[in-house]
Image (cartoon, helix red, strand yellow):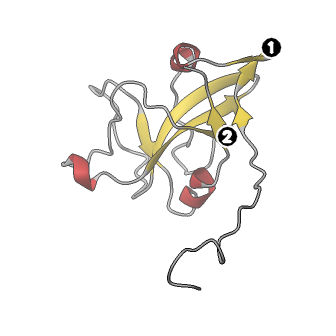
Amino acid sequence: MPSQLTTQNAVITTAVVEVKALTISGKQVTQSVFKQLPEERLYAPDGTMRGRPWGRVNFHPGRCTPPPDTTVWWAWPEHAHVVWQLGDELRRATVWAGKFDPDVSLEGRPWISETAPPSEWNLVADLPQLFIAV
């Protein structure tokens, strides 16, 4: 690879990008509607998914509460806000990478969050990015 960018070695190419938007009846879901989705754990205590994940939304409604064994914000593991289907209804969940503990109590925590079983985190991280409107 050349060490310097010049007009002789630079080329402009066109890339095709797919954007997936979360819509209801043909209208893009807004942040307000996303926040109204019931927040519920995606994983059952045995580590299996309770429904079908649709994708990740890069919107952080309120504060993201890390797993209880994480004490400082800069040590928080990676996480994803997942839209998933339970029966014929949509839910949302905050899922963290890290140690899966099905016995973690959510009492006294203002937001539901959970940690994906280690074998499942790549599946969560690889979900399609879903775009919502402002």
Q: Report the front residue among 79 and 47.
A: 79
Residue at 38 percent across and 44 percent down: it is: 103
Front label number (2 vs 1):
1
Q: Report the front residue among 109 and 55.
A: 55
- Determine which residue is flagged by label 1: 25
Residue at 23 percent across and 46 percent down: it is: 73
Residue 5 rendering spot, x and y as whole percentages: 54, 74
Q: Are marks 2 and 1 in contact (CB under 8 Å)?
A: no
Residue at 33 percent across and 45 percent down: it is: 67
- Determine which residue is flagged by label 2: 53
Q: Residues within 10 Å of mark 2 (few under 14, many from 20)?
A: many
Q: Residues within 10 Å of mark 1 (few under 14, many from 20)?
A: few
Q: Amino acid at mark 2?
A: Pro
**From the image, which quarter does the C terminus lie in?**
top right
| Residue 61 in sight in this render | yes
What kind of element bears circle 1? loop
